[in-house]
Amino acid sequence: MTSKKLTLSFVASAALLYTPAFAEEVTLDPIVVGADFRDKNLSKVAGSVSVIGEEKLYDKASQSFVEVLAAEPNVNFSTGASKAKFIQIRGIGERSQFVTPMNPSVGILVDGIDFSQSALGVTMYDLKQVEVLRGPQGTTFGTNGLAGVINIESNDPVNEAGGHIEATAGNYNTKAFGITVNAPIVEDKLLSRFSLYKNTSDGYMNNVFLGRDDTQNIDELSAKAKFRWFATDDHTIDLTLQHINIDNGYDAFTFDNSRNSHADQPGKDTQLTNAFALKSTYQVNPAMHLISAVSYSKSELEYSYDEDWSYVGEFDAALYPYSSFDQYLRDRKQFDADVRLVSDEAGRIFAGTTEWTIGAYYRDYSENMTRNYTYLASPFSTVYDTKNIALYGQLDTHFTDKLTLVTGLRLEQWDLQYTDTDLVNIDTNEFLTGGKVGLNYQESDNRLFYVTLAKGYKPGGVNADTRLNNTEKKYETETLWNIDLGLNSSHFNNKVKSRLNFFYGKRKDQQVKDSFVITRGDGSTEFVDYLSNAAEGSYYGVESQIDYFPLESLHLFTSFGLLQAAFDEYPNNPTMTDRAPANSPEYQYNVGLDYLLFDVITFKTNLEGKASQYFSNRHDEKADAYNLWHASLEYTTGDFTAALWVRNITDEQYQVRGFGSFGNNPGNGYITEKYVQLGTPRTAGLTLSYDF
């Protein structure tokens, strides 16, 4: 039945979006996507791409980065922390991290700095745009781009003095303040931009034992400095400095799945990051330019929680209660270097038909982890180091003015070293290949057809848990073959803009987050969390986005994603064969409007939702389907804006993380139950901003 619904949706979408255009475009596409080798207007990008522009971001600074992304087609998330920080695209991506080091499936870049392992530190203030690239990005991003890539660009310095200041106040004691200053140091030569943002909230939990309402609090500080130096007419150098200090609490789970915690040892979810990125763009000659980039980041993280969710003395000793605390401390360092030559118009080869890119990449990543746990006699520590060296290239061959063949290849050497305090030593190295072949047909200025076959990969790794046997300690590399077939179009004098993409993917040695439960001597249970491989998996679906401007004052929009994903073969867990993997909802949608009244008041509203989805690959417990309604009213006069906003207007309860077949409550004899973390309740506030 679901397959029939998908097929009908495909047909309906294709019919809608292939409506003949009655007039040529009268305005150029203003959105430029920078995540590929060449900047392109969004309408000319072949692939499933969403762009969240500044006009949608300026009022979202106090919101969770990951939850903002979740309104995009087939982009999902899970929490299990102070706030959402794990992203899935088309059902692929991590859902949590405990003791095991992680190789990410979704790449996250912020101004050229890799945040794939540290999405908690991505904040929404002073951003220009967020680009969401769905599907494997094997040529451009390699090991971090199996499921897709999120590319975040903050505002660049400009040659004009000025700035922006904003303040937010809301329920749950939400307070935020941000300031941005754009300050040319040497006119037309050296530009700078500085931003600072502080965001705090008590959070949505009430710890009735401690008498506190801030044990799941949000406390974020982000500071950024950007410099642009026009060294010569042919040479530009960009420097970005970033400091992030996240000091959040973590106290999310209860026996009755409410927001009333009984924990006597609330945990933490923190991140302290200092990072920089340096980029040089040099016009070597009229035929080519050289882009060189290096970045470095150092992060200290803590993730800890009260494992028993209760306080000492809450239960009679005859019920065998327990008390334990689990803490994971991580130090991460990462250095990236990328050098590429990119052809310009005069540098085309093969009789002037072919643009080319060739480059080399190096990454050195290290992570030291220490686990302090009540049931360990001493701290457990691991050292995890990886090094990547890659060569890549791409050719864009224009057979005609309308027909272009795109071919890309990436060759990557991956080396891994792992040691721990149990004297386990594992060294692995792999030679990995990815790439793509695509055909683009620009039928007219307002219609682009494309088909792309891409291969992505995600390296194997190590499970660090001491309770695993030797064969369970390692898991293998996953590969993904994906085909995208799509149409970008505009209609009715550019009043309707649309993107439609069909996709199919085949996963081999699919990496699976799994777990099993151990029963302690006192009757309580604990999870053993690890990664393994299913033999094969597959998915298919559609992503659609439509923007309609019937009036200058009215913008209607809709986006939806449909996904059918399944384990095709899962020998280690045969009951999961033909079942959908965790966090793979069959549909997601976002529909809304922006309406300008009297040239000074803008009313915005949207409804977003998603289907039910499995929490885990170990059991069949599901999160319920949900629909969230949001709205805002904004008043703008001159450089001043006041925005009154409400999110989750109906205060719908929905689940963002869950456990099943798990007993943790001594009060009922540790019977297995479903435990969930609830999503953000109704929030409301006022944001005032002023540009100067």
Image (cartoon, grey):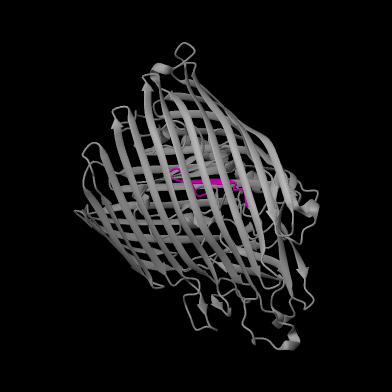
Q: Is residue 454 shown to the viewer in this render?
A: yes
Residue 65 in the image: above or below residue 260: above
Write down the region rendered in magenta: 102-116
Q: Is residue 9 shown to the viewer in this render?
A: no
* Residue 32 place in picture, x, y as percent: 38, 36
- Which is more toward the observer, 628 or 420? 420
The quarter holding residue 670 reads: bottom right
* Residue 108 place in picture, x, y as percent: 50, 47
Q: Residue furthest left?
A: 638
* Residue 351 place in picture, x, y as percent: 46, 10
Left or right, 512 with reference to 176: right
- Which is more toward the observer, 263 or 427? 427
Left or right, 12 with reference to 183: right
Left or right, 35 with reference to 685: right
The quarter holding residue 285 reads: top left
The answer to if 108 sits in the magenta stretch is yes
Which residue does the image show at 33% across and 32% down from the upper left? 28
